[in-house]
Amino acid sequence: MKVDYIIVGLGLAGLAFAEELQQANKTFIVFEDDSQTSSLVAGGVYNPVNLRRFTPVWNAAKQLDIAMPFYKKLEEKLHLQLDKKIVIKRAFKSLEEQNNWFEASDKPLLKRFLNLHLDKTKVAGVLADVGFGIVNETGRVDTLQLVTAYRNFLKENNLIRFEQFDHQQLEVSKSTVNYKDISSSKVVFCEGYGVKQNPFFKYLPLQEVKGELLTIHAPELQIDFLLKSTLFLIPLGDHYYKVGATFNHSDKTSKPSDIGRQELIEKLTKVINVPYTIIDQTAGIRPATKGRKPFVGVHEEFNNLAILNGLGTRGVMIAPTLAKNLYLHLEYNEPLDTDADIKRFANK
C-alpha cells in the first residue's frame, strides 16, 4: 500500500491535518488506538481572550479567521451542527476587575473581542457582584461529536486503522518511509502526550496536564451563555451544564479522581448558589508545552518525519491554522510559525 502521508493519532490535531490532506487530494492512512482522550473530553470552547488577566490569546484573530470556515466545511461534509455560537460572559467580582476590562478593551489586539457594553443584569443563582463583561466572536465546537463522526467517515473510506502504532517498525530513508505494509512519503505524529513514547520526538519538553470536568443538572439555574468565573459553566440544554476545568500536573492517569471532583465542587460554590446534581465526571491529559506554544515542525535528521502536537486547552482554535501551516511547509517549504517551530528546542 502506498500513500502520501501516514498520520499517527486522530484528536483535533490529526483530524485537522487529515482534512488539510483531503482538501489537497493527498492520499493518507491514519493510525488511532484511543490511548489519548484530551480531544474527546475537551470543552471545545473557542475564546480569543485570556479572561483571567484580560490579555489576547496568541494569534487569536488569525486562528479564528481560519478556524471558522474550517468547521463550516466540516459541518457540510459530515452533515452535523458542530459550531454552536454561544456568548461568553466574564463575571466581575469587583469594580477593579471591571476597570481592568475597560483598560484592556483599548488595546489594539483586544478591541475586536472585548465588548464595551457591560451586562449588569442580575442572573438568579449566579454570583456576579458587579455584572458581566461580554466577549465577541466566541462559541463551542462539540469535539466528541466531531472526532467520533470524523473517525466514522475515515473508517467508511478505509482511511484509518484502529491499532497501536509501533515506532520500532518504522523504517526511514531520505526518500520514503516504510511501516509494515505501507510505503509513504511522510509521517505526521499527532499523538498528544503519547509522544513521550516516540523515539524521534520524545526530547521535546511536553508537560502532561490532567484536566477534569463535571456535568451537572441545576434546575434553578437558567443561563444561555457560557459563564466564566473561577471556572466555566457551559449550558448543554434542559438545565444541564458542563463545569471545568482542573489543571493537575502530577496525576498522569486519564481516570476521574475524587481530588478533581472536590476541587470543582469547591470552586463551584464561588460561582453559583443554587442546588445541583452531579451527573457525570470525565478526565483527560492535555499535551501542554513550555511557554504554552505548540510543537510544529520536522525532525532535524529525517525531514519526512513531522510533528503537530501540544495544542493545550485551545486546540479548537489552533488546530486548523497550524495544520495548514505544517502542510504548506512540508509540500511547498513555506516557513513555519517561529513561535511554534520545534527548532526553538534545537541543541537544548
Image: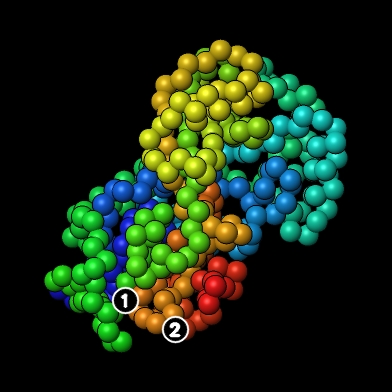
Q: Nearer the viewer, residue 87 or 281?
A: 281
Res 315 visible: no
- Badge 1 amino acid: Lys
Residue labelled with disc 2: 332
In the displayed image of the protein, which residue is found farthest to the bottom?
174
Q: Secondary structure at mark 1?
A: strand
Q: Secondary structure at mark 2?
A: helix
The residue that appears at 56% across and 12% down in the rendered structure is: 275
- Badge 2 amino acid: Tyr
The residue that appears at 55% across and 23% down in the rendered structure is: 265
How many numbered circles are shown? 2
59 relative to 172, above or below: above
Q: Is residue 154 left or right of residue 216?
A: left
The residue that appears at 70% across and 42% down in the rendered structure is: 52
Mark 2 or 1, nearer chain start: 1
Residue 300 falls in image quadrant = bottom left
Structural distance between the alpha carbons of marks 2 and 1: 14 Å
4 relative to 105, above or below: below
Q: Is residue 114 left or right of residue 260?
A: right
Q: Position of residue 309 (x, y in %)?
A: 45, 61
Q: Position of residue 348 (x, y in %)?
A: 54, 73
Res 134 visible: yes
Residue labelled with disc 1: 186
Q: Position of residue 51 (x, y in %)?
A: 69, 43
Label 1 crowding class (10 Å Cα cut-off): few <14, some 14-19, many 20+?
many
Q: Is residue 325 left or right of residue 101?
A: left
